[in-house]
Amino acid sequence: MKKILFVTLLSLVGIFGAMAQNLMQTLAVVKYSDSEAVTVKEVKDIVDTQEKEAKRKLTPQEREQIFESVINQKLVLQAAKKAGVTVSATEVDQAFFQNISQQLGLPRVYSEKELNDLVMQQKKISFTQFVKEETGMSIDEVKNTIVKPSLLLQRYILMKNQEELQKVMATDKEIRDYYELNKVQFTRPDSLKMFLVAVPRENNPNAKAKIEGLLNDLKSGKTSVEKLRVEGADMQKAGYGSADVVVMKIQQHAAQLGITYERLLAMFGEALNKPSEILETPQSYQFYEILEKYPFKALELSDVVRPDTTQTVYETVRALITQQKQYQFLEQARQDMIKSLNVPENVQRKKTGDDLIKALSW
């Protein structure tokens, strides 16, 4: 019995050893400025992540495309390194949290602590666990294998095409045509401008007393909106924050204020220049004073998009179309760069055709 078990264990060791050896098999060598191997494991790690997201097994052709993308990324990164392009750890962190916040549909960029609190509240797991479950990687691995290379690629492509990029702009005809085709979308809902005062609740047992004191001082004339506006600009020093805020009659703005949509609707029926009662949200205690109201408006090209800004619809459309055209330009520049780099003298392919498909089959 012991002999059979020993033979079985030897067999398993042999199987696992063969699997490990296969994973470390070199599929290609990228040698633009350095010499980097593209291994089966490197491709498999990306395939596994994408299959998890897609909830299906990728086809041989899709796996081959990922293999090519690994080669292309290494080529451009080597070219960027040779050109002296770098990104800082701070920039990588900022890009990581911005990307995560956008993917979760958050109204702004959340810090790691805020993301951890949010995920813990919604999913009962830590932010670290959440990232691992979603990507199959640790936070540091995501930063170093996805975020940092992406930033380096973007910076290098921008550096190589900056002069030409500045010439890519929306034309007057493109702006007017876009507006005419999408005119129904250019409206401004009922809006109001308010002066908002907020005292954060976190680690602040005196928050409610603080907001009550500020509100009483405003009502009694001991302070004014202007004084609160100036003092509240430095929250750390004043112990409260204040700002002029334009709020539209939409669900999203109610959520950003931390109130219900019904409560937002009620604001539009309140009188101007009259302090409100205290509002309690999960993050803070607040009160406000409505300064102006703006009715619904169908916007023309010369109208401002928001009543608190000077940016017109024309300028907004110009920026949108210019951004789209510049993105298309940079994408074409990226493809042209890859085409010029991905040549036999820069890439030694160890596996091609059916041999490559077989190596990518696991």
Image (cartoon, rainbow, N blue to C red):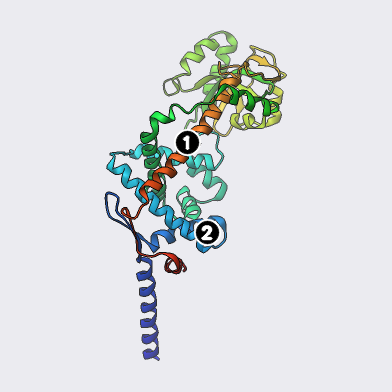
Give x and y (percent) for residue 282: 57, 34
In the visual, does 47 lie left or right of 249?
A: left
Q: Is residue 186 visible?
A: yes
> Residue shown at 39%/63% (left/top)?
40
Locate residue 308 relative to residue 82 in the image: left or right.
right
Q: Is residue 240 above or below residue 94?
A: above
Q: Could you say which disc has been placed on residue 329 in the image? A: 1
Quadrant of the rendering where the N terminus is positioned: bottom left
Image coords of residue 311 (percent x, y):
56, 18
- Residue 143 visible: no
Q: Residue at x 66, y 32 (%)?
A: 251
- Give the spatial CA distance, label 1 vs label 2: 30 Å
Q: Residue furthest top?
A: 221
Left or right: 331 as drawn, with respect to 312: left
Tag 1: Cα neighbours inside 10 Å, few (<14), some, or many (≥20)?
some
Looking at the image, residue 306 lies above or below residue 220: below
Tell me the crowding category of disc 2: few under 14, some 14 to 19, or many 20 or more residues within 10 angstroms, Cα based: few
Residue 198: image location, x then y, percent:
54, 24
Numbered circles on residues, count: 2
> For residue 168, which numbered disc appears in the image?
none
Q: Which residue is mark 2?
A: 51
- Circle 1: residue type: Phe
Q: Amino acid at mark 2?
A: Glu
Q: Secondary structure at mark 1?
A: helix
Q: Nearer the viewer, mark 1 or mark 2?
A: 1
- Looking at the picture, does residue 356 appear above or below residue 100? below
Q: Quadrant of residue 351?
A: bottom left
Seen from the viewer's position, the closer of residues 316 and 174 is 174
Q: Position of residue 67 (x, y in %)?
A: 43, 58
Marked residue nearer the N-terminal end (1 or 2)? 2
